[in-house]
Amino acid sequence: MSDWILTSAGCTLAIAGVAAELNLLRYLIRECRGSRRFAGTRTEPSRRAPRGLAGDRASRNPHPLAVAGLLVVGLTASAAVARSAPAEAPASPAPPPVPEPDSPEAQARVGTEGPGQSEPSAAPSHDSSGSSATGVAVSPGASDAGAATSAPANADAVSVQINLDYTTAYFYRGIIQEDSGLILQPAVRITANLMQTETARLDGFVGTWNSFHGQKTGAQTRGDFSEYWYETDLLAGATLTVGPVALTASYTFLTSPSDAYETVQELGFTVALDDRSWLKQWSLKPYATLAIETGADASDGADSDPGVYLELGIAPGFTLHADSTPLSISFPALIGLSLKDYYQNAAGADDTLGFGQIGAKVSMPLGEPGRLGAWTLNAGLSVLFLGDHTRDFNGGNDTEVVATIGLQWNF
Protein backbone atom coordinates (compact mmCIF):
# COMPACT_ATOMS: atom_id res chain seq x y z
CA MET A 1 0.00 0.00 0.00
CA SER A 2 2.83 2.41 0.87
CA ASP A 3 4.47 1.77 -2.50
CA TRP A 4 1.18 2.50 -4.22
CA ILE A 5 0.72 5.74 -2.29
CA LEU A 6 4.26 6.90 -3.05
CA THR A 7 3.94 5.98 -6.71
CA SER A 8 0.63 7.82 -7.02
CA ALA A 9 2.04 10.88 -5.27
CA GLY A 10 5.13 10.88 -7.45
CA CYS A 11 3.11 10.52 -10.66
CA THR A 12 0.74 13.26 -9.57
CA LEU A 13 3.61 15.64 -8.83
CA ALA A 14 5.20 14.77 -12.16
CA ILE A 15 1.99 15.46 -14.05
CA ALA A 16 1.52 18.74 -12.21
CA GLY A 17 5.07 19.76 -13.00
CA VAL A 18 4.85 18.86 -16.67
CA ALA A 19 1.51 20.64 -16.87
CA ALA A 20 2.96 23.78 -15.36
CA GLU A 21 5.94 23.68 -17.69
CA LEU A 22 3.62 23.34 -20.69
CA ASN A 23 1.63 26.31 -19.43
CA LEU A 24 4.85 28.30 -19.00
CA LEU A 25 5.89 27.43 -22.56
CA ARG A 26 2.52 28.61 -23.87
CA TYR A 27 2.93 31.86 -21.97
CA LEU A 28 6.42 32.49 -23.38
CA ILE A 29 5.21 31.77 -26.92
CA ARG A 30 2.26 34.09 -26.45
CA GLU A 31 4.51 36.86 -25.14
CA CYS A 32 6.63 36.55 -28.27
CA ARG A 33 3.52 36.74 -30.47
CA GLY A 34 1.85 39.46 -28.42
CA SER A 35 -1.14 39.26 -26.11
CA ARG A 36 -4.51 38.30 -27.51
CA ARG A 37 -8.17 38.72 -26.74
CA PHE A 38 -11.05 36.37 -27.19
CA ALA A 39 -13.93 37.22 -29.44
CA GLY A 40 -16.46 37.74 -26.68
CA THR A 41 -17.37 37.35 -23.02
CA ARG A 42 -20.00 35.47 -21.09
CA THR A 43 -20.24 38.23 -18.45
CA GLU A 44 -23.20 39.61 -20.39
CA PRO A 45 -24.37 36.69 -22.52
CA SER A 46 -25.37 37.56 -26.06
CA ARG A 47 -27.43 35.39 -28.36
CA ARG A 48 -24.54 34.31 -30.56
CA ALA A 49 -21.63 34.40 -28.11
CA PRO A 50 -20.26 30.83 -27.91
CA ARG A 51 -19.84 29.45 -24.42
CA GLY A 52 -16.43 29.80 -22.84
CA LEU A 53 -15.18 33.06 -24.32
CA ALA A 54 -13.79 34.66 -21.21
CA GLY A 55 -12.13 37.93 -22.22
CA ASP A 56 -8.58 39.22 -21.98
CA ARG A 57 -5.93 36.86 -20.58
CA ALA A 58 -2.94 39.18 -21.03
CA SER A 59 -2.46 39.73 -17.29
CA ARG A 60 -2.46 36.03 -16.36
CA ASN A 61 1.13 35.00 -15.79
CA PRO A 62 2.57 31.70 -14.48
CA HIS A 63 5.35 31.41 -11.92
CA PRO A 64 8.31 29.78 -13.71
CA LEU A 65 10.54 29.02 -10.70
CA ALA A 66 7.77 27.30 -8.77
CA VAL A 67 6.60 25.16 -11.67
CA ALA A 68 10.15 24.21 -12.66
CA GLY A 69 10.88 23.06 -9.10
CA LEU A 70 7.62 21.09 -9.01
CA LEU A 71 8.54 19.34 -12.26
CA VAL A 72 11.97 18.28 -10.99
CA VAL A 73 10.65 17.03 -7.64
CA GLY A 74 7.75 15.16 -9.21
CA LEU A 75 9.76 13.43 -11.92
CA THR A 76 12.49 12.45 -9.44
CA ALA A 77 10.03 11.00 -6.92
CA SER A 78 8.06 9.15 -9.58
CA ALA A 79 11.15 7.64 -11.21
CA ALA A 80 12.65 6.58 -7.88
CA VAL A 81 9.50 4.88 -6.62
CA ALA A 82 8.76 3.24 -9.97
CA ARG A 83 12.22 1.68 -10.03
CA SER A 84 12.14 0.47 -6.42
CA ALA A 85 8.56 -0.80 -6.13
CA PRO A 86 8.14 -4.51 -6.98
CA ALA A 87 5.50 -5.42 -9.51
CA GLU A 88 2.30 -6.72 -7.98
CA ALA A 89 0.97 -9.91 -9.50
CA PRO A 90 -2.61 -9.79 -10.68
CA ALA A 91 -4.96 -11.03 -7.97
CA SER A 92 -7.62 -12.05 -10.48
CA PRO A 93 -8.06 -12.67 -14.20
CA ALA A 94 -6.97 -9.76 -16.33
CA PRO A 95 -9.54 -6.96 -16.52
CA PRO A 96 -11.12 -6.02 -19.84
CA PRO A 97 -8.88 -4.15 -22.27
CA VAL A 98 -8.00 -0.74 -20.94
CA PRO A 99 -9.90 1.82 -23.02
CA GLU A 100 -7.69 3.98 -25.17
CA PRO A 101 -7.59 7.79 -25.34
CA ASP A 102 -8.94 8.01 -28.86
CA SER A 103 -12.69 8.09 -28.49
CA PRO A 104 -14.39 10.30 -31.07
CA GLU A 105 -15.54 12.71 -28.40
CA ALA A 106 -12.15 12.84 -26.72
CA GLN A 107 -10.62 13.87 -30.03
CA ALA A 108 -13.26 16.48 -30.80
CA ARG A 109 -13.14 17.81 -27.25
CA VAL A 110 -9.48 18.79 -27.33
CA GLY A 111 -8.14 19.36 -23.88
CA THR A 112 -9.16 16.11 -22.40
CA GLU A 113 -8.54 12.42 -22.45
CA GLY A 114 -11.69 11.01 -21.27
CA PRO A 115 -14.08 9.47 -19.43
CA GLY A 116 -13.77 8.83 -22.52
CA GLN A 117 -10.65 7.07 -22.96
CA SER A 118 -12.80 4.54 -24.64
CA GLU A 119 -12.65 3.06 -28.06
CA PRO A 120 -15.22 4.32 -30.55
CA SER A 121 -17.27 1.27 -29.71
CA ALA A 122 -17.88 2.89 -26.37
CA ALA A 123 -20.09 5.90 -26.04
CA PRO A 124 -18.40 9.04 -27.21
CA SER A 125 -17.50 11.29 -24.37
CA HIS A 126 -14.71 13.67 -23.64
CA ASP A 127 -13.36 14.73 -24.58
CA SER A 128 -10.39 18.39 -23.98
CA SER A 129 -3.66 14.46 -26.54
CA GLY A 130 8.54 6.90 -27.44
CA SER A 131 11.95 6.89 -27.90
CA SER A 132 14.14 4.53 -29.88
CA ALA A 133 16.57 2.49 -27.84
CA THR A 134 18.10 -0.96 -27.53
CA GLY A 135 15.54 -3.55 -26.59
CA VAL A 136 12.61 -1.67 -28.15
CA ALA A 137 10.48 -3.77 -30.46
CA VAL A 138 7.79 -2.44 -32.77
CA SER A 139 4.50 -4.30 -33.19
CA PRO A 140 2.67 -2.66 -36.09
CA GLY A 141 -1.07 -2.67 -35.75
CA ALA A 142 -0.93 -3.91 -32.19
CA SER A 143 -2.57 -0.84 -30.73
CA ASP A 144 -6.21 -1.02 -29.77
CA ALA A 145 -6.50 2.75 -29.84
CA GLY A 146 -9.73 3.69 -31.43
CA ALA A 147 -10.63 0.11 -32.27
CA ALA A 148 -14.14 -1.21 -32.00
CA THR A 149 -13.47 -4.51 -30.27
CA SER A 150 -15.55 -6.84 -28.18
CA ALA A 151 -14.46 -7.54 -24.63
CA PRO A 152 -13.36 -11.09 -23.85
CA ALA A 153 -15.89 -13.54 -22.49
CA ASN A 154 -14.37 -13.34 -18.98
CA ALA A 155 -14.61 -9.55 -18.85
CA ASP A 156 -16.09 -8.11 -15.66
CA ALA A 157 -19.82 -7.48 -15.72
CA VAL A 158 -19.22 -3.98 -14.31
CA SER A 159 -16.14 -1.84 -14.86
CA VAL A 160 -15.19 1.64 -13.69
CA GLN A 161 -12.84 4.14 -15.28
CA ILE A 162 -11.53 7.30 -13.60
CA ASN A 163 -9.46 9.98 -15.34
CA LEU A 164 -7.65 13.07 -14.16
CA ASP A 165 -6.15 15.20 -16.93
CA TYR A 166 -4.38 18.51 -17.31
CA THR A 167 -4.56 20.38 -20.62
CA THR A 168 -3.02 23.57 -21.92
CA ALA A 169 -6.28 24.62 -23.59
CA TYR A 170 -9.85 23.44 -23.90
CA PHE A 171 -11.59 23.47 -27.28
CA TYR A 172 -14.98 21.83 -27.73
CA ARG A 173 -15.33 20.70 -31.35
CA GLY A 174 -13.20 23.62 -32.46
CA ILE A 175 -14.95 26.21 -30.26
CA ILE A 176 -12.59 27.87 -27.77
CA GLN A 177 -13.54 27.44 -24.11
CA GLU A 178 -10.33 28.40 -22.27
CA ASP A 179 -6.62 28.58 -23.08
CA SER A 180 -5.03 30.11 -19.97
CA GLY A 181 -4.27 29.10 -16.42
CA LEU A 182 -4.83 25.76 -14.75
CA ILE A 183 -7.34 23.48 -16.51
CA LEU A 184 -8.07 20.15 -14.78
CA GLN A 185 -10.55 17.68 -16.22
CA PRO A 186 -11.62 14.72 -14.03
CA ALA A 187 -14.09 12.11 -15.26
CA VAL A 188 -15.80 8.91 -14.14
CA ARG A 189 -17.52 6.25 -16.26
CA ILE A 190 -19.30 3.09 -15.16
CA THR A 191 -19.94 0.42 -17.78
CA ALA A 192 -22.10 -2.68 -17.33
CA ASN A 193 -22.32 -5.67 -19.66
CA LEU A 194 -26.02 -6.15 -20.35
CA MET A 195 -25.85 -9.01 -22.82
CA GLN A 196 -23.18 -11.06 -24.57
CA THR A 197 -23.23 -13.87 -27.10
CA GLU A 198 -20.57 -15.38 -29.33
CA THR A 199 -21.14 -12.72 -31.98
CA ALA A 200 -22.58 -9.70 -30.16
CA ARG A 201 -22.18 -7.67 -26.99
CA LEU A 202 -24.39 -4.99 -25.45
CA ASP A 203 -22.98 -2.59 -22.85
CA GLY A 204 -24.73 0.20 -20.96
CA PHE A 205 -22.90 3.11 -19.37
CA VAL A 206 -23.32 6.23 -17.27
CA GLY A 207 -20.69 8.85 -16.61
CA THR A 208 -19.70 12.37 -15.83
CA TRP A 209 -17.00 14.62 -17.26
CA ASN A 210 -15.84 17.89 -15.67
CA SER A 211 -13.62 20.89 -16.39
CA PHE A 212 -12.21 23.10 -13.62
CA HIS A 213 -10.64 26.42 -14.67
CA GLY A 214 -8.27 28.47 -12.54
CA GLN A 215 -9.32 31.55 -14.52
CA LYS A 216 -12.99 31.16 -13.46
CA THR A 217 -14.02 31.19 -17.13
CA GLY A 218 -17.24 33.19 -17.52
CA ALA A 219 -18.29 32.42 -13.93
CA GLN A 220 -21.48 34.07 -12.75
CA THR A 221 -21.31 32.55 -9.26
CA ARG A 222 -19.18 34.22 -6.58
CA GLY A 223 -17.63 33.34 -3.25
CA ASP A 224 -17.51 29.54 -3.39
CA PHE A 225 -15.77 26.70 -5.19
CA SER A 226 -18.37 26.58 -7.95
CA GLU A 227 -16.81 29.61 -9.67
CA TYR A 228 -13.90 27.37 -10.71
CA TRP A 229 -16.24 24.57 -11.86
CA TYR A 230 -16.78 25.58 -15.47
CA GLU A 231 -18.42 22.43 -16.80
CA THR A 232 -19.93 19.15 -15.72
CA ASP A 233 -21.46 16.77 -18.24
CA LEU A 234 -23.84 13.94 -17.42
CA LEU A 235 -24.15 11.17 -19.97
CA ALA A 236 -25.76 7.78 -20.41
CA GLY A 237 -26.13 5.37 -23.29
CA ALA A 238 -25.46 1.94 -24.73
CA THR A 239 -23.08 0.30 -27.18
CA LEU A 240 -23.92 -2.67 -29.38
CA THR A 241 -20.91 -4.47 -30.85
CA VAL A 242 -21.50 -7.03 -33.61
CA GLY A 243 -18.32 -8.44 -35.10
CA PRO A 244 -16.11 -5.56 -36.24
CA VAL A 245 -18.90 -2.96 -36.09
CA ALA A 246 -19.88 -1.00 -32.98
CA LEU A 247 -22.96 1.22 -32.71
CA THR A 248 -23.36 3.67 -29.82
CA ALA A 249 -26.28 5.84 -28.80
CA SER A 250 -25.96 8.34 -25.94
CA TYR A 251 -27.63 11.36 -24.40
CA THR A 252 -25.59 14.14 -22.76
CA PHE A 253 -26.37 17.15 -20.59
CA LEU A 254 -23.59 19.78 -20.77
CA THR A 255 -24.09 21.93 -17.68
CA SER A 256 -22.14 24.69 -15.92
CA PRO A 257 -22.05 24.79 -12.09
CA SER A 258 -20.55 28.31 -12.38
CA ASP A 259 -23.43 29.45 -14.62
CA ALA A 260 -20.95 30.30 -17.38
CA TYR A 261 -23.43 29.12 -20.02
CA GLU A 262 -26.88 27.64 -20.36
CA THR A 263 -27.31 23.86 -20.34
CA VAL A 264 -26.85 22.18 -23.71
CA GLN A 265 -28.53 18.84 -24.42
CA GLU A 266 -27.39 16.46 -27.12
CA LEU A 267 -28.37 13.13 -28.65
CA GLY A 268 -25.38 11.34 -30.14
CA PHE A 269 -24.79 8.35 -32.42
CA THR A 270 -21.46 6.77 -33.33
CA VAL A 271 -20.58 3.94 -35.70
CA ALA A 272 -17.04 2.54 -35.56
CA LEU A 273 -15.31 -0.13 -37.61
CA ASP A 274 -12.47 -2.36 -36.44
CA ASP A 275 -10.63 -2.96 -39.71
CA ARG A 276 -7.57 -4.68 -38.23
CA SER A 277 -8.58 -8.13 -39.46
CA TRP A 278 -8.41 -6.84 -43.05
CA LEU A 279 -5.73 -4.13 -43.06
CA LYS A 280 -3.51 -5.58 -40.30
CA GLN A 281 -0.79 -3.06 -39.42
CA TRP A 282 -2.31 -0.52 -41.82
CA SER A 283 -5.66 -0.42 -40.05
CA LEU A 284 -7.27 3.04 -39.79
CA LYS A 285 -10.07 2.33 -37.27
CA PRO A 286 -12.53 4.73 -38.92
CA TYR A 287 -15.61 6.12 -37.18
CA ALA A 288 -18.40 8.61 -37.72
CA THR A 289 -20.30 10.57 -35.06
CA LEU A 290 -23.62 12.38 -35.49
CA ALA A 291 -24.68 14.76 -32.70
CA ILE A 292 -28.07 16.48 -32.57
CA GLU A 293 -28.68 19.36 -30.16
CA THR A 294 -32.12 18.92 -28.63
CA GLY A 295 -32.47 21.72 -26.06
CA ALA A 296 -33.20 25.43 -26.26
CA ASP A 297 -29.49 26.35 -26.12
CA ALA A 298 -26.53 25.31 -28.24
CA SER A 299 -22.73 25.15 -28.12
CA ASP A 300 -22.39 28.10 -30.51
CA GLY A 301 -24.34 30.45 -28.23
CA ALA A 302 -27.18 30.86 -25.75
CA ASP A 303 -30.63 30.75 -27.39
CA SER A 304 -29.08 30.02 -30.78
CA ASP A 305 -30.61 27.51 -33.17
CA PRO A 306 -30.08 23.83 -32.24
CA GLY A 307 -27.48 22.38 -34.56
CA VAL A 308 -26.54 19.06 -36.11
CA TYR A 309 -22.87 18.05 -36.02
CA LEU A 310 -21.01 15.40 -38.05
CA GLU A 311 -17.54 14.12 -37.27
CA LEU A 312 -15.44 11.78 -39.40
CA GLY A 313 -12.18 10.39 -38.09
CA ILE A 314 -9.51 7.72 -38.06
CA ALA A 315 -7.00 6.58 -35.42
CA PRO A 316 -4.17 4.47 -36.87
CA GLY A 317 -1.52 3.34 -34.43
CA PHE A 318 0.93 0.73 -33.21
CA THR A 319 2.51 -0.54 -30.00
CA LEU A 320 6.13 -0.32 -28.90
CA HIS A 321 7.47 -2.84 -26.38
CA ALA A 322 10.28 -1.33 -24.33
CA ASP A 323 11.66 -3.60 -21.60
CA SER A 324 8.33 -5.48 -21.48
CA THR A 325 6.39 -2.20 -21.10
CA PRO A 326 3.90 -1.65 -23.95
CA LEU A 327 3.55 1.89 -25.26
CA SER A 328 0.37 2.35 -27.29
CA ILE A 329 0.87 5.12 -29.84
CA SER A 330 -1.85 6.46 -32.11
CA PHE A 331 -2.21 9.27 -34.63
CA PRO A 332 -5.83 10.43 -34.63
CA ALA A 333 -7.11 12.69 -37.38
CA LEU A 334 -10.61 14.06 -37.75
CA ILE A 335 -12.80 16.71 -39.29
CA GLY A 336 -15.79 18.40 -37.62
CA LEU A 337 -18.66 19.61 -39.82
CA SER A 338 -21.96 21.41 -39.35
CA LEU A 339 -24.85 19.72 -41.12
CA LYS A 340 -27.22 22.38 -39.83
CA ASP A 341 -26.69 25.52 -37.69
CA TYR A 342 -23.86 24.12 -35.55
CA TYR A 343 -21.25 26.83 -36.25
CA GLN A 344 -23.35 29.98 -36.47
CA ASN A 345 -21.83 33.44 -36.16
CA ALA A 346 -23.35 36.59 -34.63
CA ALA A 347 -25.48 37.16 -37.74
CA GLY A 348 -26.88 33.64 -37.59
CA ALA A 349 -25.01 32.41 -40.68
CA ASP A 350 -23.72 28.86 -40.51
CA ASP A 351 -20.28 27.57 -41.57
CA THR A 352 -19.98 23.97 -42.73
CA LEU A 353 -16.32 23.47 -41.77
CA GLY A 354 -15.81 23.73 -38.04
CA PHE A 355 -12.28 22.40 -37.67
CA GLY A 356 -9.76 19.77 -38.65
CA GLN A 357 -7.44 18.06 -36.22
CA ILE A 358 -4.35 15.87 -36.28
CA GLY A 359 -2.36 14.61 -33.34
CA ALA A 360 -0.32 11.97 -31.58
CA LYS A 361 -1.19 10.15 -28.37
CA VAL A 362 0.80 7.81 -26.12
CA SER A 363 -0.49 5.51 -23.38
CA MET A 364 1.79 3.69 -20.94
CA PRO A 365 0.68 1.26 -18.21
CA LEU A 366 2.07 1.99 -14.73
CA GLY A 367 3.02 -1.44 -13.43
CA GLU A 368 0.96 -4.64 -13.62
CA PRO A 369 -2.80 -4.70 -12.98
CA GLY A 370 -3.56 -5.92 -9.45
CA ARG A 371 -5.91 -5.45 -6.54
CA LEU A 372 -5.88 -1.69 -7.16
CA GLY A 373 -6.81 -2.06 -10.82
CA ALA A 374 -4.85 -0.91 -13.86
CA TRP A 375 -3.13 2.49 -13.92
CA THR A 376 -2.23 4.21 -17.20
CA LEU A 377 -0.32 7.38 -18.02
CA ASN A 378 -1.70 9.19 -21.09
CA ALA A 379 -0.16 12.08 -23.03
CA GLY A 380 -1.19 13.74 -26.25
CA LEU A 381 -0.42 16.60 -28.60
CA SER A 382 -3.03 17.93 -31.05
CA VAL A 383 -2.98 20.57 -33.77
CA LEU A 384 -6.29 22.24 -34.65
CA PHE A 385 -7.04 23.96 -37.94
CA LEU A 386 -10.10 26.14 -37.41
CA GLY A 387 -12.80 27.10 -39.89
CA ASP A 388 -13.89 30.68 -40.54
CA HIS A 389 -16.36 30.99 -37.68
CA THR A 390 -14.39 29.01 -35.10
CA ARG A 391 -11.37 31.12 -36.05
CA ASP A 392 -13.39 34.26 -35.31
CA PHE A 393 -14.46 32.79 -31.97
CA ASN A 394 -10.75 32.23 -31.29
CA GLY A 395 -9.75 35.87 -31.73
CA GLY A 396 -8.71 35.46 -35.37
CA ASN A 397 -6.19 32.64 -34.78
CA ASP A 398 -6.84 29.74 -37.14
CA THR A 399 -4.28 27.27 -35.75
CA GLU A 400 -3.85 26.03 -32.19
CA VAL A 401 -1.58 23.45 -30.52
CA VAL A 402 -2.92 21.70 -27.41
CA ALA A 403 -0.99 19.37 -25.08
CA THR A 404 -2.62 17.03 -22.55
CA ILE A 405 -1.28 14.73 -19.86
CA GLY A 406 -3.16 12.65 -17.30
CA LEU A 407 -3.71 9.54 -15.21
CA GLN A 408 -6.27 6.83 -15.90
CA TRP A 409 -7.52 4.18 -13.47
CA ASN A 410 -9.52 1.13 -14.56
CA PHE A 411 -10.96 -1.46 -12.21
Image (cartoon, rainbow, N blue to C red):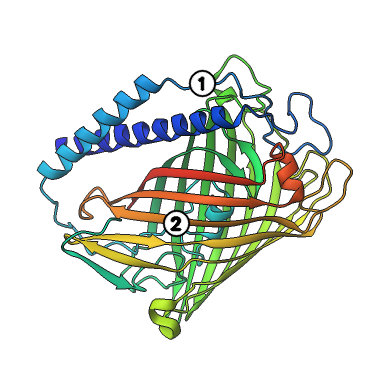
- The relative height of residue 395 versus residue 363 in the rendered view (above or below) is above
Q: Please tell me how many numbered marks the rendered image carries.
A: 2
Q: Is residue 352 above or below residue 401?
A: below
Residue 105, position in %: x, y? 56, 55
Q: Residue at x 59, y 62 (%)?
A: 334
Residue at the image point whose x is 39% and y is 81% from the top: 280
Residue that protrudes farthest toward the right in the picture? 347
Give me the disc on residue 61: 1
Can residue 126 be seen in this snapshot?
A: no
Front-lying residue, 107 or 38: 38
Q: Secondary structure at mark 1?
A: loop
What label sits on residue 203 in the rendered view?
none
Q: Residue furthest bottom?
A: 278
Q: Secondary structure at mark 2?
A: strand
Is 305 on the left or on the right of 286, as rendered?
A: right
The front one of 373 and 346 is: 346
Residue 178 seen by the camera = yes
- The quadrant in which residue 308 appears is bottom right
Q: Position of residue 284 (x, y in %)?
A: 49, 73
Q: CA distance from mark 2 to mark 1?
A: 28 Å
Q: Residues within 10 Å of mark 1 (few under 14, many from 20)?
A: few
Q: Which amino acid, mark 1?
A: Asn
**Amino acid at dot 2:** Ala
User: Which residue occupies the foreground of this view, 401 or 264?
Assistant: 401
Residue 188 horizontal side relative to residue 259, left or right: left
Which tag, 2 or 1, sits closer to the chain's start? 1
Q: Residue at x 26, y 30 (%)?
A: 72
Q: Which residue is mark 2?
A: 360
